[in-house]
């Protein structure tokens, strides 16, 4: 067996059921004309216990992949790698949290409450890190339910108080973020419906909608600060005040660069900000 063949077989054998299922969908979407060859070759190889190329080709001599077999092997290997990159790129922080919750649910069904609590606490830490407030509330509720499953014997009165306090703090944080997001969305909606306003009256109305624009400091929460600066960018863009727009965009970039883990939560947002900076620099003729 050549190194190329060995690499392909090892790669196929290493795939999980989810990765194999994803590959089948991916291959159907991303290949034209030879997708049947790729999928059929993949399905033939994945069930083999031992691989012998001469015997394999003899058994499958009428298959389309048998002709130009070396090319088809190479193409399949590349296609599998492409699908794996796409599959694992979708592993977002939110998905990781939901995986932990699912594991906790399984452990709960088995009566392993302390182990389930450990999973929930890990998920809470990650949800707090990425400011997933809705998930934080769900996780706090699940944590409380797990303590109830144990007749509240595994939690102190002080810990119950801390848990209730966390509920209140998370709700307040979520309300602040939603307030900033609502302002930003209303500004965006106006721009989408009417385009960039030209009259002074329209500009003033849009500016008033950004109720936090006069604050000296941005909010502490990342999501609220993200909406805060985006609102300011929108207003300065509308006014064609590109110098100030550039400063606000730099504030957005700094916000992410000082909390780099958040780029995983909003990858498209980060790319959009960088794109807008390039557009601004071009408008300002700063090459």
Image (cartoon, rainbow, N blue to C red):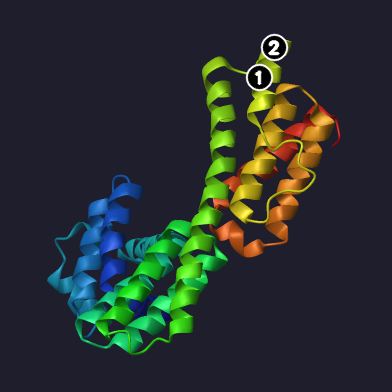
Quarter of the rendering containing residue 95? bottom left
Judge whether residue 43 can be spotted in this image.
yes
The residue located at (31%, 55%) in the rendering is 27
Numbered circle sitting on residue 205: 1
Q: Residues within 10 Å of mark 1 (few under 14, many from 20)?
A: few
Query: Which residue position is annotated with label 2?
Result: 201
Identify which residue, 28 or 253, lies in the foreground.
253
Answer with left or right where residue 29 lies relative to residue 91.
left
The quadrant in which the N terminus is found is: bottom left
In the structure shown, which secondary structural element does the residue marked by tag 2 occupy? helix
Residue 12: give x, y in percent of width and height.
Answer: 31, 74
Is residue 129 placed above or below 109 in the rendered structure? above
Q: Residues within 10 Å of mark 2 (few under 14, many from 20)?
A: few
Residue 172: give x, y in percent of width and height.
Answer: 53, 55
The quadrant in which the C terminus is found is: top right
Residue 153: give x, y in percent of width and height.
Answer: 33, 89
Is residue 33 placed above or below 281 in the rendered structure? below
Is residue 35 placed above or below 196 in the rendered structure? below
The residue located at (24%, 65%) in the rendering is 41
Answer with left or right where residue 29 lies relative to residue 285.
left
Answer with left or right where residue 17 lies relative to residue 73.
left
Q: Are marks 1 and 2 in contact (CB under 8 Å)?
A: yes
Is residue 17 placed above or below 38 in the rendered structure? below
**Residue farthest along the front direction in this orientation:** 157
Quarter of the rendering containing residue 66? bottom left
Judge whether residue 270 can be spotted in this image.
no
Identify which residue, 66 or 279, lies in the foreground.
279
Answer with left or right where residue 146 lies relative to residue 254.
left
The residue located at (65%, 23%) in the rendering is 206
In the structure shown, which secondary structural element does the residue marked by tag 1 occupy? helix
Quarter of the rendering containing residue 180? top right
Label 1 to label 2, Cα distance in Å?
Answer: 6 Å
């Amino acid at each position: 067996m050549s190194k190329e063949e060995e690499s392909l077989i090892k790669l196929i054998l290493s795939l999980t059921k989810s990765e194999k299922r994803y590959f089948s969908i991916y291959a159907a979407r991303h290949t034209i004309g030879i997708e049947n060859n790729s999928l059929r070759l993949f399905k033939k190889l994945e069930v083999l216990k031992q691989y012998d190329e001469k015997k394999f080709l003899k058994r499958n001599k009428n298959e389309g992949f048998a002709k130009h077999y070396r090319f088809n092997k190479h193409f399949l290997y590349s296609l599998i790698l492409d699908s794996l990159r796409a599959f694992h790129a979708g592993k977002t922080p939110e998905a990781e949290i939901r995986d932990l919750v699912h594991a906790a649910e399984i452990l709960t069904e088995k009566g392993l409450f302390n182990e389930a609590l450990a999973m929930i606490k890990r998920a809470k830490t990650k949800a707090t890190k990425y400011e997933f407030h809705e998930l934080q509330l769900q996780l706090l509720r699940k944590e409380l339910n797990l303590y109830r499953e144990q007749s509240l014997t595994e939690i102190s009165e002080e810990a119950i108080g801390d848990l209730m306090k966390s509920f209140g703090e998370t709700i307040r944080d979520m309300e602040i973020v939603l307030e900033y997001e609502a302002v930003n969305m209303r500004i965006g909606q106006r721009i989408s419906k009417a385009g960039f306003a030209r009259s002074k009256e329209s500009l003033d109305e849009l500016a008033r909608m950004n109720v936090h624009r006069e604050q000296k400091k941005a909010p502490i929460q990342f999501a609220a600060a993200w909406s805060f600066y985006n609102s300011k960018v929108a207003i300065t863009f509308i006014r064609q005040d590109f110098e100030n727009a550039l400063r606000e965009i730099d504030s957005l970039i700094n916000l992410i660069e000082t909390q780099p883990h958040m780029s995983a939560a909003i990858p498209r947002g980060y790319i959009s900000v960088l794109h807008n900076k390039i557009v601004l620099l071009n408008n300002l003729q700063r090459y």
